Image: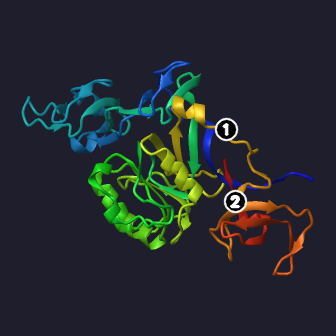
Amino acid sequence: MAQAYTPGLKVTNRTTHRTKRLLPISGEVLVKKGDHVNARDVVAETFMPGDVNPLNMSNLLSMPPADVHECMLKKEGDRIKAGEPLARTKGIFGMFRTEYKSKVEGTLETVSNVTGQVIIRGAAQPVQVKAYLTGEVVEVIPKEGVVIESEVTFIQGIFGIGGETFGPIRMACKSHDQELTAELITPDMKDAVIVGGARVTDEAIEKAVKVGAAAVIAGGMDDQDLRDFLGYDLGVAITGSEQVGLTVVITEGFGDIHMAERTFKLLASREGSDASVNGATQIRAGVMRPEIVIPLSEEDLKSETEAHFEPGQLKLGRPVRVIRDPYFGLIGEVSDLPSEQHVLGSGSKARVLEVKFDSGETALIPRANVELIEG
């Protein structure tokens, strides 16, 4: 029988994970190949050019542009402090001079004799790239960044907001179908990655921000709660740049949906371990999924086994999630892969698979209506 493949989210207790950490412009790489780095370590840094502050000095001093240069008290390349005299006219017989004091701090970049414009460049802004993943540097890209590799527990979500963050896993719910409410968020969860079960409420996220949590992971979230939390409707472009005080990752979808029991148990088994979380999501070209990455300790490596399925391959026993009605959100296992096409309710024909749910019920579902839970 020919092999069948379908897209899916990855949820695995052990996998080899690589991440590329790059600077936005050329800079300095601070580590070398073979080094062991922690998630919070700075592995590369550079300086972004400061803000440009243009000044029409010709107008400010009421003189022709060609005369501006000889009135400058600073030359190109000189540092300037806020409040320091920058230019001064000669006046009449040394009197009635007009002086301009800089309102900003920076470096005098250019003085134009054509326009009379002066440009002050603000202080360079330092940019540091952290490792994000605790592991080994396996490749150094000169002046750009590094590639880091590690054995990890890896979980992808459906949707997220907020950027990269770090913290120990803390279980707030006792079961995968328990709602994550504000009462379950406690002050001792500061800097932690809080794991819920089913839907997380807007009040719970607000409480998590208040106690200083690093991230919240839950099965589902109401779209109105998301709107209330952000204060605006989220577009369909990439997320991850939101400045909301913490990162949120939803593992199953929008609505009152509980977390997959397998995912919940996997996170619970890592409670207390440091995790790296990224809420960045992109659903269009160049798909990007939010993720929870938990590096494995030496003890974990001895007890865990690698994923044994080929990525994307449909096989008997593989866990799948249904992503269309009438079984939307349900999780089961592939129990049969019929080779022939079946006639659907719409009258069209499609390749299907049989899914056995936890309840024992089975259903024939179009292969396009499921996604794999990789691992």
Which residue is pictured at 10% across the width and 33% down the height?
Answer: 92
The residue that label 1 is drawn on is 306
Whether residue 249 can be seen here: yes
Mark closest to the chain's N terminus, 2 or 1: 1
The kind of residue on which mark 1 rests is Glu
Secondary structure beneath disc 1?
loop
Question: In which quarter of the view is residue 340 placed?
Answer: bottom right
Task: Find the distance from the CA under tag 2 to the CA under tag 1.
Answer: 19 Å
Image height check: is 75 above or below 319? above
Image height check: is 197 above or below 89? below
Q: Is residue 261 left or right of residue 276?
A: right
The image shows residue 241 at horizontal and vertical percentages of 45, 51
Q: Is residue 317 left or right of residue 54?
A: right
The image shows residue 192 at horizontal and vertical percentages of 37, 47
Question: In which quarter of the view is residue 185 placed?
Answer: bottom left
Image height check: is 227 above or below 82? below
The residue that label 2 is drawn on is 320
Which residue is pictured at 50% across the width and 23% down the height?
Answer: 36
Q: In the depicted view, which residue is nearer to us: 32 or 49?
A: 32
Work out which residue is located at the far bottom of the displayed protein and give it: 346
Q: Is residue 128 left or right of residue 327?
A: left
The image shows residue 18 at horizontal and vertical percentages of 60, 34
Crowdedness of circle 1 by 10 Å Cα count: few (<14), some, many (20+)? some
Whether residue 281 can be seen here: no
Secondary structure beneath disc 2?
strand
**Number of numbered discs:** 2
The image shows residue 98 at horizontal and vertical percentages of 14, 38
Which residue is pictured at 42% across the width and 70% down the height?
Answer: 225
